[in-house]
Image (cartoon, grey):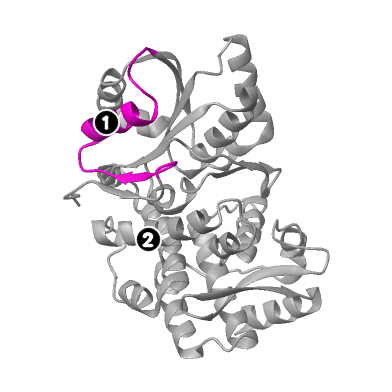
């Protein structure tokens, strides 16, 4: 896949740029958002695999801008890097290095790394500037976008976090050419989620799209990013509307935690695929969402992800009850009335338990 143009999405405060020429556009946006009138101290957090695969390109990138690289830290991606203890060890390193507040953090990697980096930069000395260069499909279309970042508390996901927007996010689709197939699949689950939040037309394009072994077209990539950023721009601090982006995640996060504890970890996208299917099942039962369409989407998801050994309510209840959207009144889920028409609905635990058991027995 090759991009044919530079596309800017989002507001001027924290734009997302899709680029076919990384060195040209990164330098341009660095000059616009950070400046080039003096040497800027930077810290680089880079995914270990990305650092190995793209060492020359990353070196050229850093040489193209006016910076003093204080440290380049290679990190193994995955949920383990989002543990509070690991984040604390990095903050201690920065303190020992006497990192100053004018330092800029550059994060190059997948969604767990940008989550970690975004959190670190938001709390160190009450805030460093940050630039994201996502390298996975999940991170390009969802995880690195919109300023939300979080650490995990044990196996419970995203319990400790902030909202802290990067100066800019540079999406370079060529990184996807070296992405393992499983990571591509994970990203496509989030794109289907965005399609459900957007329109029946977008859903149909996804249903017609079969080749998830290959990177998406520029059109599909940019459309998915626009869906998310349009919502983020309307509700940046997640007071209401932005919670829609958690479609499929109430159960998705619970499944991700369950399988990790069971020693059979699944990708975030895999867990979200099951959670999205379950959310559509709930929507059919509770909001009148079209059953035939829900079944078509679930069939598409099942062709891409296994739905084996879905745990019973007793195995996921603790995680579901810790979901960050919940209120004292019950479990708050994002459901769909129709494509592009989500709603927040607070459910009694008994209803969730009953429908969950019905879902896994269907």
**Residue at the image position 25 percent from the left and 22 percent from the top:** 60
The nearer-to-camera label among 1 and 2 is: 1
Determine which residue is flagged by label 2: 224
Residue 360 visible at all: yes
Q: Secondary structure at mark 2?
A: helix
**Residue at the image position 21 percent from the left and 32 percent from the top:** 24
Q: Report the magenta residues as a range.
A: 12-39
**Residue at the image position 56 percent from the left and 57 percent from the top:** 235
Q: Is residue 362 left or right of residue 231?
A: right
Screen quadrant of the C terminus: bottom right
* Front-lying residue, 5 or 256: 5
**Magenta span contains residue 20:** yes
Q: Residues within 10 Å of mark 1 (few under 14, many from 20)?
A: some
Q: Position of residue 150 (x, y in %)?
A: 61, 43
Q: Which mark is residue 28?
A: 1
As drawn, 146 above or below 31: below
Q: Position of residue 22 (x, y in %)?
A: 25, 35
As drawn, 160 above or below 36: below
Closer to the chain start, of discs 1 and 2, is 1
Number of numbered markers? 2
* Front-lying residue, 91 or 199: 199
């Amino acid at each position: 896949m090759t991009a044919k143009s530079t596309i800017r999405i989002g507001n001027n405060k924290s734009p997302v740029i899709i680029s076919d020429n990384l060195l040209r556009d990164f330098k341009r946006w660095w000059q616009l958002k950070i400046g080039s009138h003096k040497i800027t101290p930077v810290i680089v957090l880079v995914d270990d695999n990305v650092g190995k695969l793209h060492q020359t390109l990353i070196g050229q990138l850093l040489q193209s801008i006016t910076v003093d690289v204080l440290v380049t830290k290679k990190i193994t991606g995955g949920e383990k890097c989002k543990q509070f203890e690991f984040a604390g060890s990095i903050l201690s390193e920065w303190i020992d290095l006497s990192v100053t507040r004018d330092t800029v953090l550059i994060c190059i990697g997948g969604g767990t790394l940008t989550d970690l980096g975004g959190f670190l930069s938001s709390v160190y000395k009450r805030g460093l500037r940050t630039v994201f260069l996502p390298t996975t499909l999940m991170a390009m279309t969802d995880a690195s976008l919109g300023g939300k970042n979080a650490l995990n508390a044990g196996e419970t996901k995203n319990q400790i976090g902030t909202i802290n927007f990067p100066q800019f996010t540079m999406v370079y689709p060529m990184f996807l050419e070296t992405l393992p197939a499983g990571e591509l699949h994970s990203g496509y689950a989030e794109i289907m989620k965005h399609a459900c939040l957007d329109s029946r037309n977008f859903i149909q394009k996804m249903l017609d799209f079969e080749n998830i072994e290959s990177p998406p077209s520029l059109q599909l990539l940019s459309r998915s990013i626009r869906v998310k950023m349009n919502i983020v721009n309307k509700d940046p601090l997640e007071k209401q509307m932005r919670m829609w982006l958690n479609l499929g995640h109430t159960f998705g996060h619970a499944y991700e935690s369950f399988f990790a504890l069971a020693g059979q970890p699944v990708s975030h996208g895999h867990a979200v695929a099951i959670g999205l299917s379950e959310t559509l099942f709930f929507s059919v039962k509770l909001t009148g969402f079209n059953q035939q369409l829900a079944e078509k989407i679930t069939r598409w998801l099942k062709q891409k992800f296994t739905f084996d050994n879905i745990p019973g309510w007793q195995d996921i209840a603790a995680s579901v009850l810790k979901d960050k959207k919940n209120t004292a009144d019950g479990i708050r889920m994002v459901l769909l009335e129709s494509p592009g028409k989500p709603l927040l609905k607070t459910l009694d635990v008994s209803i969730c338990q009953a429908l969950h058991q019905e879902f896994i027995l269907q």
